[in-house]
């Protein structure tokens, strides 16, 4: 293993932490629908076609992690209900969804045209995610970058044997 890589603590990985919040299919699709403007449980359910309990679980999780907020509303003559609106934290996930869509359009579409295009409202040019450094150089790929230790503390965990990890997990 590269000596630099040995210094990184996988437990402190922001990617792993992010995947713990939005790393499943339904969470990402709920966020997609929020970006497309859907706010109400039944509207999202109709588009996604998942089970009610799955959608309820994902909405609860996304609210608990601060990506969506529950806002009450009441239709005339109806009981109070809630809609789900993007928070600033949720809005900042948008480039990630665009990057996933770009990758899927390129590698998963089998030559078919994309089903959705995202354009800039002002000039109508297509929007794309692009990696750039703080000095504006880009577009960058993984080959143009290098991981460096950040300011967070880094501790290497020792690997437990499978039997020890299983005993610990059962406690």
Image (spheres, rainbow, N blue to C red):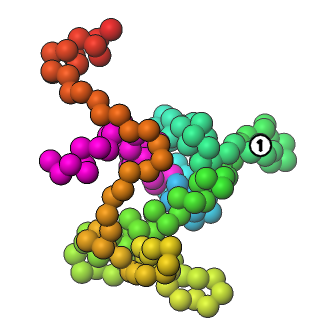
Q: Whole-percent x and y of residue 73?
A: 78, 46
The C terminus is located in which quarter? top left
Q: Is residue 81 left or right of residue 12?
A: right
Mark 1, residue position: 72
Q: Whole-percent x and y of residue 140?
A: 36, 76
Q: Which residue ends up furthest to the right in the rendered image?
A: 76
Q: Whole-percent x and y of residue 94?
A: 53, 63
Vertical relation: 64 (above or below) 42: above
Q: Nearer the viewer, residue 41 or 134?
A: 134
Give the prevailing secondary structure in the magenta stretch.
helix
In this rendering, does residue 133 appear at all?
yes
Q: Secondary structure at mark 1?
A: strand
Residue at 28% across / 13% down in the picture? 168
Vertical relation: 98 (above or below) 81: below
Rate crowding at label 1 as few (under 14), some (14 to 19) or many (20 or more) other CA atoms within 10 Å.
few
Residue at 62% across / 48% down in the picture? 68
Image quadrant in which you'd find residue 71: top right
Vertical relation: 160 (above or below) 73: above
Would residue 2 be counted in the magenta stretch?
yes
Q: Nearer the viewer, residue 74 or 29?
A: 29
In magenta, the rendered stretch is 1-30
Residue at 45% across / 74% down in the picture? 133
Would residue 119 be counted in the magenta stretch?
no
Q: Whole-percent x and y of residue 55?
A: 50, 41
In this rendering, does residue 116 appear at all?
no
Q: Nearer the viewer, residue 143 or 61?
A: 143
Residue at 41% across / 68% down in the picture? 99
């Amino acid at each position: 293993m590269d000596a630099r890589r040995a210094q990184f603590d996988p437990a402190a990985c922001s990617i792993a932490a992010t995947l713990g919040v939005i790393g499943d299919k339904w969470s990402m699709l709920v966020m997609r629908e929020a970006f497309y403007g859907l706010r109400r449980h039944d509207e999202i359910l109709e588009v996604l076609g998942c089970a009610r309990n799955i959608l309820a679980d994902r909405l609860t999780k996304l609210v608990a992690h601060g990506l969506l907020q529950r806002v009450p509303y009441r239709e005339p003559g109806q009981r109070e209900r809630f809609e789900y609106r993007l928070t600033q934290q949720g809005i900042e996930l948008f480039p990630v969804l665009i990057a996933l869509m770009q990758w899927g359009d390129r590698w998963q579409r089998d030559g078919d045209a994309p089903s959705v295009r995202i354009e800039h409202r002002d000039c109508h040019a297509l929007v794309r995610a692009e990696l750039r450094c703080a000095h504006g150089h880009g577009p960058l790929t993984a080959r143009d970058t290098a991981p460096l230790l950040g300011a967070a503390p880094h501790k290497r965990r020792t690997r437990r044997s499978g039997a020890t990890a299983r005993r610990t997990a059962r406690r």
